[in-house]
Image (tube, helix red, strand yellow):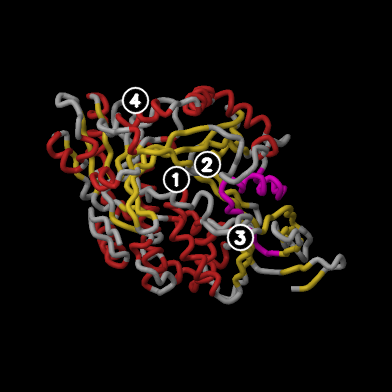
Amino acid sequence: MFRDKKDIPVTEPDVVLIGAGIMSATLGIMLKQLQPNLTIEIYERLGEVAAESSDAWNNAGTGHSAFCELNYTPQKPDGSVDITKADVIAEWFEQSRQFWAFLVKSGIIKSPPRDFINSVPHMSFVWGQDNVNFLRTRYEAMITSPLFQGMQYSEDPQQLAQWMPLIMAGRAQNEKVAATKMDAGTDVNFGCLTRFMFKELQAMEGVTLYLNHEVRKLRQKDTESDKRWRIRVKDINTEEKKRVRAKFVFIGAGGGSLPLLLASGIPEADGFGGFPVSGQWLKCTNPEIIAMHSAKVYGKASVGSPPMSVPHLDTRMINGKRALLFGPYAGFTTKFLKKGSFFDLPFSIKVNNLRPMLAAGYTNIPLTKYLIGQVMQSPEDRVAALREYVPTARPEDWELEMAGQRVQVIKKDKDKGGVLEFGTEVVASADGSIAALLGASPGASTAVSIMVDLIQRCFPVQAKSPEWQAKFKEMIPSLGISLSDDPQLCQEMRAYTAEVLQLKEGQLVQR
């Protein structure tokens, strides 16, 4: 470190990671495995890591593997079900499991795997004849893929009562119901996993984590001899300023990524906007009720609702204790982060993204009405929604818990002007010197595949080298091979990761 003419400290790391969530943790670990001599600086505006979207209470916890999420398997006009997206997401989650198994087996994560991942069955549950027909068709399509082998289906109320007694108790005997069940499902505490990875990152030579530090400005020098990024950082506690010059910058700040991406000035950021969606859970406070349910049960989303609001009754392990959540209930705020500013949305509107944002707003009026309706819900309304899944639910057994913020991506569209998307998207500069992650679900569950893709885009020469290729295969053995096309490898990889991660089908370990 040295000081410039204004006596402001200056550092020159190879890599800067902005945001201390699951994405930065994953990328940081990967880069240090691929090139151990890299120097990395990580800047987080809060006083702890994994405090926003990666935190266990802030939505990130299901372990999205497409076993039970019905929005990943849309029904076509002819009545058939498209499992293409489900296949892709399931494949990505298997890559995540392989990477986590590598971290455990190599000693990078020293804590027992059950501290961050546990076996919990994943189920889809529907009622009404049309929905039953849909789920049956979905099941018949999914079991043709090796990634969904072992899935069970039933319309028998007695069988369903064994799978999910809390949901079936008090339900009308003549109601048409159906469910699928995957015992290979998991619950992942991404907050815990992120903290484990940052603990090891900080112990690595050449890595420095700065908490309570906010990135204020960033721009590229862009000369023939120097294309490093100039970053201005402020210590929130002391107000001390520093400057950083980095060869590569990753913006993984959750909802805070969009403003920083727009501030970078790269042409690839033109037209991008964000639409914030907040969330709330009903959290069960009755230990007897919590003990009655051991599954992640997903239903169908209401018409016009965003995919992140698909209702589910969710068993989780948080800080070694079993928890039961229902929701999330969607809402609207102008904040991009749970601990953000109400000015986040208005300040993100620029000349080059105004048209896409207005166009996306105009074409998503039903979504806006839906969110307003969710905001206006009373406690009785929330309990009524819960009773569709838990007919015997009592208000005194549940309390409201704030979930995290999600910023859905708005991007330019040549036909519509602008479109609102609900996935995740990596935006990178043409020279690969800066990249940002935007969007929400499936997010954390597919962080590994997202970061592999980012590395291949931003470090194309190194990524193709024999040394990096060998390390990729060590971290993710099935990388480059489609598990949906190789049943034997799919089975072997799932068995291998289950052994290393100490997963037992359908059993939830509580310390």
Residue 77: mark: 4
Question: Are the residues at dot 3 and dot 4 in contact (C-beta closer than 8 Å)?
Answer: no
Q: Earlier in the sequence, mark 3 or mark 4?
A: 3
Q: Earlier in the sequence, mark 3 or mark 2?
A: 3
Disc nearest the viewer among 3 and 1: 1
Residue type at the position of mark 4: Pro
- Residue of label 3: 17
> x, y (%) of residue 331?
51, 32
Disc nearest the viewer among 3 and 4: 3
Vertical side of 344 occupied by 451: above or below: below
Residue 441: mark: none
Residue type at the position of mark 3: Leu
Residue type at the position of mark 1: Asn
- Residue of label 2: 406
- SS state under label 1: loop
| 263 and 62: which is toward the camera | 62
